[in-house]
Image: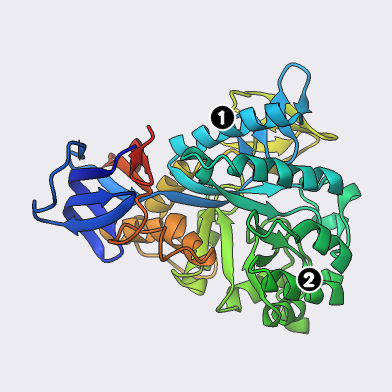
Amino acid sequence: MYSSLKIINANVVTPNGLLIGEVFIKDGIIEKISDKVKHPSTDNIIDAKGRYLLPGFIDIHTNGSAGFDCTYGVYDTLNNTFDFDENEYITGLNKAVKSYIDAGCTKVILSTISAPFEQILQVINFIKNYKKKETLINNVIFGLMIEGSFIKETANAGAHNPDYFQCPEEKILSELLTGNEEIIKIVNIPPEWGENSINSYKIINEKKIIAAAGHTCASAYEINKAVTYGLSLAIHLFNGPSYSSYKPFEGGGAIEAFLKAENVFVEIIADGLHVDKSYFLDALKRKGNEKVIAITDNMFVTGSGIKSEFRMGEKLGVVSDDFKYLYIKEKPNALFGSNLKMNEAFVNLLNWLTSDTQGVWNKIHKANKFEEALMLTSKLCSGNPADLLKISDSYGSVAEGMHADLILADIKYDKFYTMEINKVILNGNIIN
């Protein structure tokens, strides 16, 4: 544990642009950023050697990593089953956290898929017990998203099992949320449940939890009504599926409503496969730079070493030959979660934003200059998720007074940009 740390000769990515200089950290807080050597001395010095100093990534939607699944536990590759024993769960979670850190994540929200309700409650208890230890790396787990439990329509199930869908009745929500407000950060409630959805948004917002909608076939009218009652996040926009309509009836579909709703954040999987880069850039232009959040929506296969087939519940999945995506064996065109890491999402965005790209609804998205693209990419991966979670006064940017959750990385260009993470710093401490 360091009481102080100084990083010198860094390209510091601040909210106001790039600054070549040094950063002084004391007791886990960024105390001073300067382009001049005038910070207090310390025995703990990192010479960045021109590398880029960025805020740590905040992935608000990940199902798991490195053989660990938030809902089902640790994957056994020999038997194609999951171990849900608490000790094994915690061991697997620690392994996943290290995988997240290696990818530059300093905060993540784990997402649950549909499962028996008692199992979801057990997951919450596991995470609560894990967080009680209050170690540096435990704090990477910011909380949970309840994603699959309240989906309504089987047609919108995606990889979720419809057998475990249920109506978000007040009694169920009370059992889920009471005493768990510090762990549960986001709850997915599609508007199709009508008054039950509206009542749910009220309850969720009263507990300062984010009300989200995804895996929905709601009309724009239903989405807009939900927004007035506190809906503030669209889950993996363009995927799920989420309903789209080019007709004016009921205002169009969910996608049209989400794109138009000024105060609603949208998360988008940034692998270029779940959502083509043309659609990503179109959505970014329509929503504006403040309301789009890059996510992975990755799962236990990511970083696990699984190279071919895997099983989750009744579904058999396959890893693509290039390891870039996962698909359902019976339906090769149906994606089965992402195999994306946040450092890869960052690089994808940086390359898309620095290239002339044809849009779908826009003729062309002109290339940004590198510094502009770098700052925007950092917002999409760090700043905007911090805004959504209402922690942007402490996390999500490199600025004086902020917690020192940082990435030091080589970013190089040779036909396209690449990133290699050199160090990850959590609360002013070098983790790797």
**Is disc 1 placed on a helix, strand or loop?**
helix
Tell me the element at label 2.
helix
Identify the image quadrant of the N terminus.
Answer: top left
In the rendered image, residue 69, in percent from the top left (x then y), is placed at 68, 36
Which three-letter amino acid code belongs to the residue tagged 1?
Answer: Lys
Q: Is residue 185 above or below residue 225?
A: above
Distance from Cα at disc 2 to Cα at disc 1: 34 Å
Residue 248 occupies quadrant: bottom right
Q: Where 53 falls versus 95 (above or below)?
A: below
Q: Looking at the image, is 35 positioned above or below residue 362?
A: above
Residue 82 horizontal side relative to residue 324, left or right = right
Residue 85 appears left or right of 96:
right
Give me the disc on residue 200. Answer: 2
Pick the quarter of the image with the C terminus.
top left
Q: Which residue is the site of mark 1?
A: 95
Q: Residue furthest top?
A: 78
Q: Residue at x 46, y 72 (%)?
A: 288
Tell me the kind of residue under disc 2.
Answer: Ser
Rendered residue at 41%/61% (across/down): 394
Q: Residue at x 72, y 44 (%)?
A: 125
Relative side of 148 to 292, left or right? right
* Few, some or many residues within 10 Å of mark 1 (<14, 14–19, 20+): some
- Label whose residue precedes the other's in the sequence (2 or 1): 1
Local crowd at mark 2 within 10 Å, few (<14), some, or many (≥20)? many
